[in-house]
Amino acid sequence: MLTTFLYHPCAPAVNSAPTAAPLRGAAGWSMRRFRTAEEICQHWPEGERADGFWLRAETLAFLRNHPQGITTEALLLEHAHDGRRVWLSAQPFSFSAAGQVSDQAKGKTSSYDFRRRLLAPFSFRVLCIGQFLVSGPYAQDGLQNLGAAEATDLLSATADALMDSCRGYTAVLLKDLYPTEHPVSCALEQRGYHALPADPVMGLHIPAHWNNLEDYLLDLSSKYRVRYRRARGKMEGLERRRLSAAEVDRYQDRIYHLYQQTSAGADYNAATLSAAYFPWLATTGSPSKGHRSAALSYFHGYFTASGEMVGFTSGIGNGKVFHAHFLGLEDTYKRSHHLYHNMLYDLLATAIEEGYEELDYGRTALEIKSSVGATPERFACQLKARPRLLNQLVPIFTPAVYQATPWEERNPFRN
């Protein structure tokens, strides 16, 4: 079965590169849209950032050929006079307040809230400029080289061009391109882009003196060292084991079942992974300490003494960043063995031992991740609907659909 997912997403046939179209409202800039895996593989230029996994041709081509609940295309913006480039991805998706947002995540409303009930029968097509499979600013390259005014014009022009050419879309979403307080985010708000409630991205900087978890423990306060040892003590009877690509393929059905169990409890899911995703990810590379020329994948399984897999974690080494990616676990072991808590420690151990400088924990379970040492960073998710009247209703309806859950930030380190 493994050979199925070693299939290269590119066909051997050669075709012409996508045509560049001028962007109105962004002087000198044009856009090329790469809409097939073949176009991406043959003509997509490599970006500049070392942590560019989400903009690699291989990644974009796979996602184009294997939609993970969302389709993907690649966008290349080019300046005619000085050759500057901006790399982006676009993902159209459907949003349904009734079908995708849990009741527990809705805002402060009565049980008969008119706004939520009014939205319930409808599904809206939205075009996202960004990437739903990762949190944070990893789905863009080149924006860092632009001034705030030029970047604002360019993103507005790109969004307008895409909306004009994609009939049936109600809104455009700019996801995680800039921090919430960045001048570009503020300028886009002045142009009618509404900030949506979104949890912060939890990240942990790994100091140079941490070579293993023992070094990490030395920096914890006594209270959190006790919590660490208590959680570790609960793991008796479970074995954590590194999985090869062949093993990920062999355990594919079990891994996918555990993923589905865990993702079903999320407040909101725009993307829904297919069973093909994990075997593909497992073939993207094998870890080699100190080697950062390509993205590396990490899979670990958690097994009982009888050999039953009751949990797994996946991770992506992306330049100097280690992304804690999708995971899954049996809910009973989450309580009896503190399995989720231990997974966070194990992911940190892998990031430290493999020499990464940053651990990206993503956007879920904020408080427990802060208790491990992660700190929040907020990135803007900004939506603009059309027509104009509908856009004016966005801030009125948003609080009834979703409200970020309050949480208490922890600091486990000694002062």
Image (tube, rainbow, N blue to C red):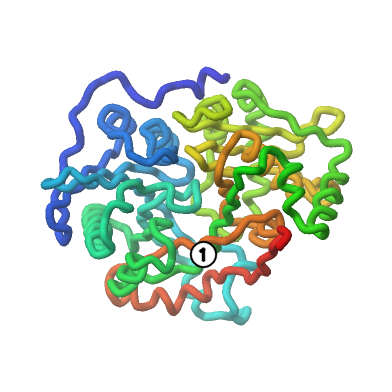
Q: Is 358 situated left or right of 59 in this image?
A: right
Residue drawn 53% across and 38% down?
Answer: 274
**Visible in this render: residue 110?**
yes
Q: Residue 411: where, in percent of width, then height?
A: 69, 62
- Position of 311 compared to 85: left or right? right
Q: Nearer the viewer, residue 410 or 315?
A: 410
Residue 363 position by quadrant = bottom right
**Mark 1 surroundings: few (<14), some (14-19) or many (≥20) residues within 10 A:** some
Which amino acid type is shown beneath numbered disc 1?
Ala
The tally of labels here is: 1
Image-quadrant location for residue 35: top left
Regarding mark 1 in the picture, which secondary structure is present there?
A: loop
Q: Nearer the viewer, residue 402 or 373?
A: 373
Residue 129 vs residue 68, the one in the foreground: 129
Q: Residue at x 32, y 58 (%)?
A: 169
Residue 102 x, y percent position in the rendering: 60, 63
In the picture of the structure, the residue carrying the numbered disc 1 is 198
Placement of 71 over or under 9, stated as above or below:
below
Classify residue 84 as left or right of residue 106.
Answer: left
Relative vertical location of residue 63 with respect to residue 41 in this rendering, above or below: below
Where in the figure is residue 65, as x and y percent of width and height? 40, 33
375 vs 106: above or below? above
Q: Quadrant of the N terminus?
A: top right
Quarter containing the C terminus: bottom right
Q: Is residue 163 visible?
A: no
Query: Which residue shows up at 21% across the image and 26% down it?
Result: 15
